[in-house]
Image (cartoon, rainbow, N blue to C red):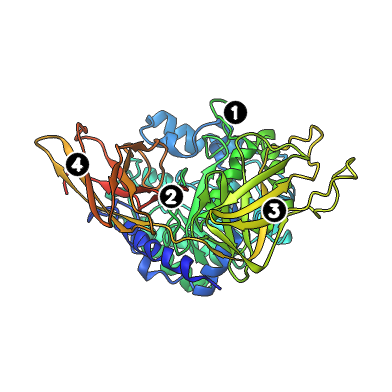
């Protein structure tokens, strides 16, 4: 059951979702569905989705042979390049080492619960047997329905099948004499009846020839197509097109509803042999933890090599995640946010249907095996029934140390729950496995009510080249004074969902009561787009309002 403290905290979450949905400030971005309220995703399917927590995104297309960004090299390309892409590339696509069963077995080991495979990316190349276009995998030397094989292999491993589908189609634009581009009204299905009919026919193929599909990800205008999807498969769960799906970023606040963050292992979506910089396994585990602590799903991307294998860097990271999930997946599946997301380097998830709370401890310095640590959890209150343990460990044996009993102990003090615990399992030979351990606590209660902040409106002053930003501190959370302020970042040149620029903090101001606060953001170029969010600094962590897009034309 959700405690009163958690319920109070999540009042702000609902406000944040509504604010984020309206972030376009009156002008929807071309090609994007912003009407999430008319979603036909069924409530039980949404709840199922939120329980899964961890998905595998697979970006793969005919241009993987070139080690180029998937599809987008066609935007602004010369006629010669375009013709070679559409006519010559398919003649050399032959992934002779493609083994989807190997992918699926590794994904299952890594704790993946659903897969999303690129049936058709923006280039228009069909990775499945389609009758709508000759530009598909059946007209290559490989001549096999890759999508069918991927879905079959993952189903056999108990992983829910999902598809990515791009309504934007560069091949269709090219064949119909239209400029290849994205993000403008003229190339969207709603402005091209022929393209909408073409997309609809392809979606019918995918949702009638390949069995039940659990998850569908529309990367582009989905207003009409998602209705067709729900008609063909009423149980299907539409993600992008019907819920928040931030790309390459994790929101600053939790949401009381479904959302999914899609993030690459390196910089690239599709395999790139050069100029890609992989995140470490630990960084990917940290992304999974933060996403789940904020109530979302992580859709982690891999890009197979042109021969069908996963790059060794991708396999290594999935295996590192596999070990961590083998021990700690209980803290990832079927969980919801705690009253706060984290206390420094300790992150929280809470089982949705039980009293279990998980403290995921991720110190900056790797925690050595056999080393005791003392922790204070300020947001947690023990009860007479509280029990504490470390996931994966029995708390009774430390290898080669028979006189040591590595049992976690706890007691309450005025500042919170005090834990004394140990990493007692040997996961690697050097005894310095760098990844977080998870402390499981049952029958605990919230020890505080956190403050709540909401991002407000903004005003642009063209004469001074400045924005006036507004926020509202809704609740002090029992504090006598708090520091509030704003953060902003440029989103110029970004895809509508993607965010890669770092946040820039404005100076904080101290307040002693709830209410409106504001700040000036001066000297901003009129040609760039930005987004901002309000922030309140609690002694334990920073709490954020929803991100809002700023436009000078407001």
Residue 54: percent from left, percent from top: 60, 54
1 or 4: tag closer to the N-terminus? 1
In this rendering, the answer to whether 68 lies above or below 291 is: above
- The secondary structure type at the circle numbered 3 is helix
The local crowd at label 3, few if under 14, some if 14 to 19, many if 20 or more residues have their Cα within 10 Å, is many
3 or 2: tag closer to the N-terminus? 2
| Residue at numbered disc 1 | 273
1 or 2: tag closer to the N-terminus? 2
- Disc ID at residue 251: 2
Q: How far is mark 3 from mark 4, CA to CA?
A: 45 Å
In this rendering, the answer to whether 317 lies above or below 382 is: above
- Disc ID at residue 328: 3
**Picture residue at 38% right of the left edge, 43% below the top:** 495
Q: How far is mark 1 from mark 2, CA to CA?
A: 30 Å
Q: How far is mark 1 from mark 3, CA to CA?
A: 32 Å
Q: Nearer the viewer, residue 350 or 395?
A: 395
1 or 3: tag closer to the N-terminus? 1
| Residue at numbered disc 4 | 467
């Amino acid at each position: 059951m959700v405690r009163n403290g958690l319920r109070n905290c999540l009042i702000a979450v609902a406000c944040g979702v509504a604010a984020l949905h309206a972030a376009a400030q009156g002008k929807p971005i071309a090609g994007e569905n912003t009407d999430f309220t008319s979603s036909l995703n069924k409530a039980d399917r949404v709840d199922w989705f939120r329980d899964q927590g961890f998905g595998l995104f697979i970006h793969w297309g005919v241009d993987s042979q070139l080690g180029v960004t998937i599809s987008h090299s066609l935007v602004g390309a010369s006629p010669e390049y375009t013709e070679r892409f559409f006519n010559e590339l398919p003649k050399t696509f032959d992934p002779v080492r493609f083994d989807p069963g190997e992918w699926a077995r590794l994904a299952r080991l890594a704790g993946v619960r659903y897969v999303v495979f690129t049936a058709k990316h923006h280039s228009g190349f069909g990775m499945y047997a389609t009758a709508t276009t000759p530009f598909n995998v059946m007209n290559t030397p490989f001549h096999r329905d890759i999508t069918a094989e991927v879905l079959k292999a993952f189903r056999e491993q108990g992983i829910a099948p999902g598809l990515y589908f791009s309504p934007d189609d560069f091949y269709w634009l090219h064949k119909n004499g239209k400029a290849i581009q994205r993000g403008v009204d003229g190339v969207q299905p709603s402005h091209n009846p022929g393209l909408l009919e073409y997309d609809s026919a392809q979606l019918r193929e995918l949702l009638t020839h390949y069995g039940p599909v659990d998850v569908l990800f529309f990367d582009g205008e989905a207003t009409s197509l998602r209705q067709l999807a729900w008609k063909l498969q009423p149980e299907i769960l539409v993600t992008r097109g019907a819920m928040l799906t931030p790309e390459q970023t994790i929101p600053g606040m939790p949401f009381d509803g479904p959302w999914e963050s899609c993030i690459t292992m390196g910089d690239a979506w599709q395999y790139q042999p050069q100029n890609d910089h992989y995140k470490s396994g630990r960084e990917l585990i940290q992304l999974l933890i933060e996403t789940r602590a904020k109530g979302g799903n992580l859709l982690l991307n891999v890009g197979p090599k042109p021969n069908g294998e996963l790059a060794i860097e991708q396999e290594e990271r999935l295996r590192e995640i596999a070990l961590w999930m083998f021990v700690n997946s209980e803290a990832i599946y079927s969980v919801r946010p705690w009253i706060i997301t984290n206390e420094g380097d300790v992150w929280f998830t809470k089982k949705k249907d039980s009293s279990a709370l998980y403290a995921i401890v991720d110190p900056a310095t790797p925690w050595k095996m056999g080393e005791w640590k003392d922790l204070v959890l300020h947001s947690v209150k023990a009860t007479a029934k509280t029990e504490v343990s470390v996931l994966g460990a029995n708390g009774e044996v430390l290898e080669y140390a028979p006189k040591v009993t590595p049992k976690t102990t706890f007691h309450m003090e005025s500042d919170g729950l005090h834990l004394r615990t140990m990493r007692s399992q040997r996961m690697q030979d050097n005894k310095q496995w760098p990844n977080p351990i998870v402390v499981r606590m049952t029958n605990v209660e919230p020890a505080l009510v956190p403050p709540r902040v909401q991002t407000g409106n903004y005003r642009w002053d063209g004469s001074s080249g400045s924005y006036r930003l507004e926020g509202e501190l809704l609740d002090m959370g029992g504090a006598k004074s708090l520091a509030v302020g704003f953060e902003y970042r440029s989103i110029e040149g970004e895809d509508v969902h993607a965010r890669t620029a770092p946040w820039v903090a404005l100076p904080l101001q101290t307040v002693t009561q709830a209410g409106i606060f504001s700040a000036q953001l001066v000297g901003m170029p009129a040609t760039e787009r930005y987004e901002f969010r309000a922030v309140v600094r609690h002694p334990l962590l920073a709490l954020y309002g929803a991100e809002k897009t700023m436009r000078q034309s407001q």
